Image (cartoon, grey):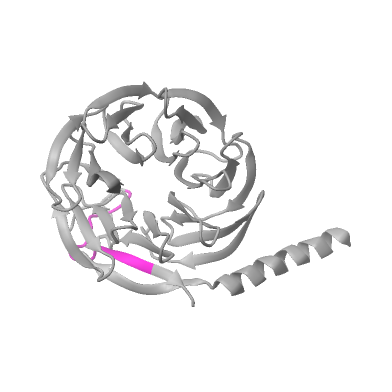
Amino acid sequence: MKKVLLTGLFLFAATVFANAAGTYHFIKEIPLGGNTGWDYLSVDATAHRLYVSRGTKVVVVDLTTDTVAGEITNLAGVHGVAVAPELGRGLVTCGKENKAAIFDLKTLQIISKVDTGAGPDSMLYDAGRQEFYTFNGHGESATVIDAKSGKVVTTIPLGGRPEFAECDAAAGLVFDNLEDQNAVAVIDAKTHAIIHRWPIAPGEAASGIALDEKNHRLFLGCDNQMMAMLDSASGKVLATVPIGDGVDANAFDPGTQLAFASCGDGTVTIAHEDGDTLTVVQTLKTEKSARTMAIDPMTHKIYLASAKFEAPAPGQKRGKIIPGTFKILVYGMDK
């Protein structure tokens, strides 16, 4: 009887929270066209910009008007963007070039290209030390770049295939998912040494990662259809919740204490963090292939990339993008 009562109260509390905070719903789509693929989405909340990777370029969307503000071109195998607002520059990972491109945030012109490890993919900016990181999938390494000079500081062997990463500048730590190791690598930002490798069981093959810096929580999107919440000080897995299939990205909104996991099956799982507890408050229906996501913590809107595809040829998982169908889906909360 006590167990039933407690379960009922727990579900009631989750419902009350969802009603109080509002639920996410579709707002609009931003058509971007073209027939090339995409990877990371990155929001610069201060500048009200969304950076969208498109193979050989980055499309920059003005989030005040939801229109294209410009492009960063002369790139190959673009994966994603990290920005250093106080320095007026950003970084693009160029996987096919084994380079990172440093660009000017105002003009969007490339300042320089820097050699990295093989297959740079994920990236981040450590504002505490003013350093960019590229996480190199083929090289199983991280390249650290001085954001001011554009010079390589060091290369860190990771001992596994890196995926999304996060930085806790206040704690002086960088966290990176080692997808094939079922682990999170913890890097000391000062020494650039790996100080921990935390197992994520029962989670497996995590790709996305998000950070609640204030409450020391990490949120991992795991391939076995769960989102795991870890203590970012100890590495302990505190809670898990079920999510959809084909997870890619995670996000966290400190203003609402909501954690998000976007999945290729056309769902975003939204869960509320409360201490050591993680509770699903909404399963948002999006579109098939909308697995890459970014959040604007100022407006609480989330952005997902999506497109329509032709029927796949024999032996292929997915067909070609139907030209003109690529778009950004925008979702927000009820008032």
Residue in the picture at 31% in, 29% down:
144
Give the total of numbered labels.
0
Name of the residue lying farthest toward the front: 86
Does residue 156 appear to the left or right of 234 in the view shown?
A: left
Quarter occupied by residue 47: bottom left
Characterize the magenta stretch by its predominant secondary structure. Answer: loop
75 magenta-colored: no
Q: Work out whether residue 114 or residue 149 is closer to the camera in this orientation and state it.
A: 149
Q: Position of residue 178 (x, y in %)?
A: 45, 32
Name of the residue lying farthest toward the bottom: 335
Quarter occupied by residue 328: bottom left
Residues rendered magenta in the picture: 317-330
Residue in the picture at 27% in, 31% down:
146
Q: From what the image shows, is residue 292 above or below residue 186?
A: below
Name of the residue lying farthest toward the right: 1
Does residue 191 appear to the left or right of 79 in the view shown?
A: right
Q: Work out whether residue 134 or residue 312 is closer to the camera in this orientation and state it.
A: 134
Is residue 81 shown to the viewer in this render?
A: no
Q: Position of residue 16 (x, y in %)?
A: 66, 71
Residue in the picture at 60% in, 60% down:
280
